[in-house]
């Protein structure tokens, strides 16, 4: 903090009477123990929550013993006049893990201390030990137009000063960088904004360049190697290999596959060079490299599949670029300066169409392009049990016009956050180096899907050069051109009718048998006990998804209907039918009564829409940037065709009766304690929230013959049977596109001015759910534990969740509906033969055949933030055949 910052520092005496931060800092630095309990603290706003790797050598701090943590967090706070960066005590890490403490909210400090770094002169910081969480939208931040203009207040030897900006390095451990808040693969902070300029005037002497084939032959006999001139053929995601206790400033690694006229070889970039060059080197870039080393290649890694199968690949050695000893020199050459006599190969791709996918083998590598029609929310998958490291992923559907079915894409983070975060319906998406996933042990009806590899790259319309399609090598590929021609023949509104965004979606569905579900594991290692279920839910992190198998019986079933209304243009005629579920894909009609009406068939609605729309004409190379003021692909000037209002699915929350139950549970089960609103001090359980539901008819309720006797004697009853707004799929519309896209992303690390406008709830927008859900209570086999779950069946062939499910007719019992995932349409006889779906009470009452039977229940669990957890019933397996086989 000394030096330039202190030169512009001055005492903040003029702010002492108003600034909450000044009051706290003055009081704590002048206290005897350097620790205070803050009484009647004024609210503060959270500007940023930043994560970094912990260190075994933490500075000594007075007070409670340190909690072992893999990562630490710094929190930047403001009172509207000043801001300061504080250290969050490891005891409070859980409130960040659950996204309870996040940027944009209001907090009150209840206990804090001041910590001096004993190894640095005049360096100290405020450490927060207890905090009370307040409003989700801080009024302080709503009134600030430029956060960067707020001075940063700090203390030196008991005096208060301010600097022009907040330090960009972590407070503890001597680290020089922050990590992305929710994963380790994405670049964060300044690393996202570093771009190298093209080297326009570098002179390349081709006679002094060594080829890759010669380098492989002579690398052991040389200490210094001639320059390389290569083209980037593939680029991997960033790999972070930092570990607590290991001192390394920037522990990053990235692989490139580079090629020249003789073949292709791996090139690995280390540490500081990754931060300096990662954003600037693209697939297709030409590099001139000096001062590199050559080492035997690391064999336990993945290699991409070359686009040119005839290209020779050298896998015995790899080129290493280091920031020092020696410091590598590399230059990016403009494509116009690349001479033909250098004979550098062109980047080639292997695009497939959807019609090709059904015939490709497992693990086949390919590239795809398509129009996005479904985008799922961002979720996280724990890399290793007990660790704090997560993979970030989302599900996406794209169509290319060659088949009725879409590509199903499982997109993990590819270290391209700008692209990953801006995937939206009606955009062109290109994914390279994707791997086909199909399980030969499962039924032939199982849908294959594509997943990203370590070398996958994503490109989307409207994000500028090297992030969108403009100038990419694949633009001349015949299948890409064919796709562009197909989009020009399509009707925008017809495609909009197919778009879906968000909601509960987990693919692939569980296999038909439990033996297939277990695969190489024994049943006892797959099954989860009731105590483990409670502990697992209590330890979930924000947006973490898990699929668990739990042994129990069906105790009760009830159907809860969600009616919704909409206003539709008068030109759209509506017919009403008295059926239970709607199979429509367009917005619901305002003529609906109690959610029991259905529009005319889909074909009629599409023909009516077709008369008022125009074909798509925007070519892929000319699409504008993604920004609030810009237009989207296929965007036309047109009036808003409909407005949707959700009533029973609106954001009307009430306290669940589960609150008292959970309080009792916590007394007996410490692992169940939710994040308290008063963190680190006296705590109380966050109430379980549920969307306000209409009354349930007695015809739509079934209970087992023992449930009435058992439910009052349970040790634990977890209430997760309410359908949450975040679990409901929404219709995409251009008018609210930024809001819809933002709601699916993980909460950002830093607050941006105007971010409070994103606080509107998703339920204000058009819901695709025009029917109810089943609340299924599962009773543990020892009858001491119960959990309420949601079962949301597929009811329409147009539902995006239908993919991967069978299409056979079945008996529509509760068991068959859960096991197959959908409600089967029944043929009606009469003047006009048609297909309808059964009323809910007929499905509910079939649960009587499940009375006192044991099942292996497959549950999908996802933490949605704070104390909100989503639990869906996905499958029921009969354990009897397994027991008999044993």
Image: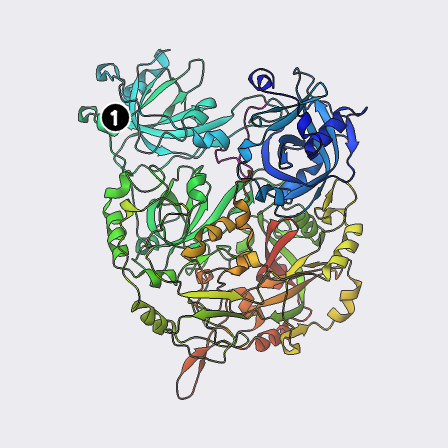
Q: Where is residue 778 in the image (x, y as percent from the top left)?
A: 67, 63
Say left or right for 508 vs 657.
Answer: left
Q: Which residue is rendered at x = 61% and y = 51% of the image?
A: 526
Identify the residue position indicated by label 1 in the image.
262
Residue found farthest to the bottom: 831
Q: Does the magenta stretch include residue 176?
A: yes
Q: Which residue is rendered at x = 33% and y = 58% of the image?
A: 637
Q: Quadrant of the C terminus?
A: bottom right
* Local crowd size for mark 1, using a 10 Å CA cut-off: few (<14), some (14–19), many (≥20): some
Residue found farthest to the right: 32
Viewer-proximal residue, 267 or 126? 126
What is the chief secondary structure element of the magenta stretch?
A: loop
Q: Does the magenta stretch include residue 519?
A: no
Say left or right for 374 vs 288.
Answer: right
Q: In which quarter of the image is the N terminus?
A: top right
Q: Where is residue 454 in the image (x, y as percent from the top left)?
A: 43, 37
Q: Which residue is rendered at x = 67% and y = 30% of the image?
A: 15
Q: Is residue 519 above or below residue 5?
A: below
Q: In the rendered structure, which segment of residues is drawn in magenta?
A: 175-188
How many numbered marks does the figure carry?
A: 1
Q: Position of residue 540 (x, y in %)?
A: 63, 46
Q: Quadrant location of residue 829?
A: bottom left
* Element carrying mark 1: loop
Q: In this view, does 490 lie above or below 413?
A: below
Residue 216 visible? The answer is yes
């Amino acid at each position: 903090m000394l030096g330039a910052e202190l030169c512009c520092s001055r005492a903040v005496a003029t702010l002492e009477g108003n600034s909450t931060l000044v009051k706290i800092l003055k009081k704590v630095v002048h206290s005897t123990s350097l620790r205070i309990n803050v009484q009647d603290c004024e609210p503060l706003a959270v500007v940023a929550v930043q994560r970094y790797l912990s260190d075994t050598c933490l500075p000594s701090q007075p007070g409670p013993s340190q909690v072992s943590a893999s990562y630490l967090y710094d929190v930047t706070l403001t009172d509207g006049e000043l801001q300061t960066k504080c250290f969050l005590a490891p005891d409070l890490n859980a409130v960040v893990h659950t996204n309870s403490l996040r940027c944009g909210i209001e907090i009150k400090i209840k206990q804090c201390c001041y910590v001096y770094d004993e190894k640095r002169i005049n360096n100290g910081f405020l450490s927060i030990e207890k905090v009370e969480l307040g409003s989700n939208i801080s009024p302080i931040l709503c009134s600030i137009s430029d956060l960067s203009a707020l001075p940063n207040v700090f203390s030196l030897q008991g005096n208060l000063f301010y600097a022009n900006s907040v330090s960009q390095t972590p407070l503890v451990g001597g680290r020089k960088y922050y990590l992305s808040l929710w994963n380790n693969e994405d670049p964060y902070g300044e690393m996202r904004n570093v771009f190298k300029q093209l080297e326009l005037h570098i002179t390349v002497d081709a006679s002094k360049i060594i080829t890759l084939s010669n380098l492989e032959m002579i690398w052991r006999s040389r200490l210094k190697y001639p320059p390389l001139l290569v083209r980037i053929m593939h680029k991997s995601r960033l790999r972070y290999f930092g570990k607590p206790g290991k001192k390394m400033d920037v522990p990053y690694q990235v692989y490139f596959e580079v090629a020249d006229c003789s073949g292709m070889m791996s090139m690995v970039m280390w540490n500081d060079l990754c931060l300096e060059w990662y954003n600037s080197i693209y697939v297709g870039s030409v590099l001139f490299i000096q001062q590199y080393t050559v080492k035997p290649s690391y064999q336990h890694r993945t290699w991409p599949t070359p686009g040119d199968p005839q290209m020779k690949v050298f896998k015995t050695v790899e080129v290493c670029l280091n920031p020092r000893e020696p410091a590598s020199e590399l230059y990016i050459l403009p494509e116009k300066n690349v001479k033909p006599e250098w004979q550098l190969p062109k980047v080639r791709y292997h695009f497939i169409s959807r019609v090709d996918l059904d015939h490709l083998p497992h693990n086949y590598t390919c590239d795809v392009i398509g129009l996005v029609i479904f985008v799922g929310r961002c979720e996280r998958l724990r890399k290793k049990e007990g660790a704090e490291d997560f993979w970030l992923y989302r599900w996406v559907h794209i169509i290319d016009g060659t088949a009725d079915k879409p590509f199903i894409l499982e997109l993990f983070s590819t270290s391209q956050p700008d692209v990953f975060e801006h995937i939206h319906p009606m955009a062109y998406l290109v994914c390279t180096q994707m791997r086909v996933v199909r399980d030969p042990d499962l039924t032939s009806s199982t849908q294959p899907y594509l997943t990203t590899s370590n070398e996958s790259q994503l490109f989307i319309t409207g994000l500028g050069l090297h992030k969108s399609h403009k100038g990419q090598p694949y633009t001349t590929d015949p299948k890409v051109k064919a796709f562009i021609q197909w989009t020009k023949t399509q009707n925008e509104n017809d495609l909009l009718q197919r778009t879906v965004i968000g909601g509960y979606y987990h693919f692939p569905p569980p296999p038909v048998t439990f033996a297939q579900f277990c695969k190489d594991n024994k049943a006892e290692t797959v099954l989860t006990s009731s105590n483990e279920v409670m502990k697992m839910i209590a330890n979930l992190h924000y947006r973490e998804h898990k699929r668990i198998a739990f042994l129990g019986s069906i105790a009760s079933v009830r159907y809860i209907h969600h009616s919704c209304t909409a206003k539709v243009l008068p030109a759209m005629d509506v017919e009403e039918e008295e059926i239970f579920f709607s199979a429509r894909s367009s917005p619901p009609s305002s003529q609906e009564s109690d959610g029991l009406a259905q529009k005319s068939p889909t074909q009629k609605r599409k023909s009516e829409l077709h008369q008022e729309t125009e074909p798509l004409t925007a070519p892929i190379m000319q699409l504008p940037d993604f920004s609030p003021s810009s237009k989207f692909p296929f965007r036309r000037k047109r009036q808003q065709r409909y407005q949707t209002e959700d009533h029973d699915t609106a954001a009307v929350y009430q306290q669940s009766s589960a609150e008292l139950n959970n309080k009792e549970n916590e007394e007996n089960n410490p692992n169940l304690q939710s994040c308290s609103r008063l963190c680190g001090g006296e705590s109380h359980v966050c109430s379980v929230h549920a969307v306000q539901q209409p009354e349930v008819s007695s015809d739509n309720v079934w209970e087992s013959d023992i449930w009435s006797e058992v439910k009052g004697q349970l040790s634990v009853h977890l209430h997760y049977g309410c359908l949450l707004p975040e679990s409901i799929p929404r219709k995409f519309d251009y008018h609210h596109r930024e809001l819809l896209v933002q709601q699916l992303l993980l909460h950002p690390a830093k607050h941006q001015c105007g971010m409070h406008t994103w606080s509107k709830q998703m339920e204000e927008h058009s819901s695709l759910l025009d029917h109810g859900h089943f609340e299924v209570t599962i009773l543990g086999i020892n009858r001491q534990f119960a959990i309420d779950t949601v079962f949301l069946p597929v009811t329409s062939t147009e539902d995006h969740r239908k993919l991967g499910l069978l299409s056979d007719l079945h008996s529509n019992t509760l068991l068959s509906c859960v096991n197959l995932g959908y409600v089967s349409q029944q043929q009606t006889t009469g003047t006009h033969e048609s297909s309808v779906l059964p009323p809910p009470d007929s499905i509910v009452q079939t649960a009587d055949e499940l009375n006192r039977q044991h099942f292996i229940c497959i549950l999908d669990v996802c933490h949605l933030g704070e104390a909100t957890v989503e639990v869906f019933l996905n499958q029921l397996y009969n354990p009897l055949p397994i027991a008999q086989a044993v």
